[in-house]
Amino acid sequence: MDAQAWNERYAASELVWSAEPNRFVAELVGAMEPGSAVDIAAGEGRNAIWLVEQGWTVLATDYSEVAISRLRDRAAAVLGDRADRLTAVVADATLPVPGGQTHDLVLFCYLQLPPPQLGEALRAGLQAVRPGGHLVVVGHAGRNLEHGWGGPNDRAVLYDPDEVLAQLDPAASDARVEVAEIRVRPVDTDDGPREALDTVVVLHR
Ligand SMILES: C[S@@+](CC[C@H](N)C(=O)[O-])C[C@H]1O[C@@H](n2cnc3c(N)ncnc32)[C@H](O)[C@@H]1O
């Protein structure tokens, strides 16, 4: 999908994703000291808004103008005065993180791109992590296609933990792997409970 296709998808629905943060983001980041965060491909901002609620100052990016517009509206409605701790900009994840600064947290949550673009995005994200900070990646796993539920049907845009690490070369970036695993995400569907398989990777720089 390109940015226009995402614009159309967002425009066709009031809220495409849930209003709640992703459960693994909440678990992992909830244990971190709040600071400066970047939410890459933030969509409608469920994680970015939650981060502000936890005390983080957040830069949210997405290449869909409709998503960013909706994120800003939702942040204003949900966060009130605290919305000034959230900056939302239209930006392509495969390019350097806007602003040129480094951050305590760089988050990728379900940015599903094929390997060359995924690698560009992840490396740009890791470059924006300051020493002592974390890179957190949550995505639909490759094995979700056969053994899980939901997510894209195209294996090229799915990734297992080793595929994330292969794109990043953590040692060369002074980064330590804290988590690199598949986690099960229970989902309630119209056909009953199902299990989605997510890749979760955390690097500490
Ligand atoms: C599945 S949604 C996830 C949104 C959000 N991270 C969340 O978890 O709710 C994927 C998002 O990635 C964005 N996206 C896809 N490719 C992108 C790219 N190259 N640069 C920036 N955003 C991109 C889409 O516009 C979409 O909002």
Image (cartoon, rainbow, N blue to C red):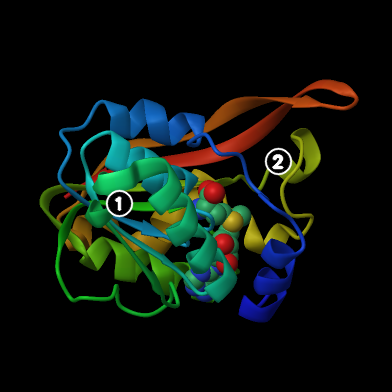
Q: Label 2 is placed on what type of residue?
A: Asn
Q: In this view, does 78 lie above or below 127?
A: above
The residue positioned 66% from the left and 72% from the top of the image is: 7
Measured from the top left, where is residue 105 in percent x and y? 24, 49
Measured from the top left, where is residue 98 in percent x and y? 28, 76
Q: Tell us which disc is closer to us: 2 or 1.
A: 1
**What is the quadrant of residue 184 in the picture?**
top right
Considering every residue shown, the one lying at the far left of the view is 131
Q: Are marks 2 and 1 in contact (CB under 8 Å)?
A: no
The residue positioned 31% from the left and 64% from the top of the image is: 125
Of residues 69 and 113, which is closer to you in this image? Answer: 69
From the image, tell me which residue sits under label 1.
83
Q: In this view, does 61 lie to the left or right of 135?
A: right
Q: Is residue 129 above or below residue 179?
A: below
Q: Is residue 30 left or right of residue 122?
A: left
The residue positioned 39% from the left and 52% from the top of the image is: 76
Secondary structure under badge 2? Answer: helix
Badge number at residue 141: none
Cα separation, mark 2 vs mark 1, equals: 36 Å
From the image, tell me which residue sits under label 2.
144
Measured from the top left, where is residue 171 in percent x and y? 21, 55
Of residues 32 and 120, which is closer to you in this image? Answer: 32
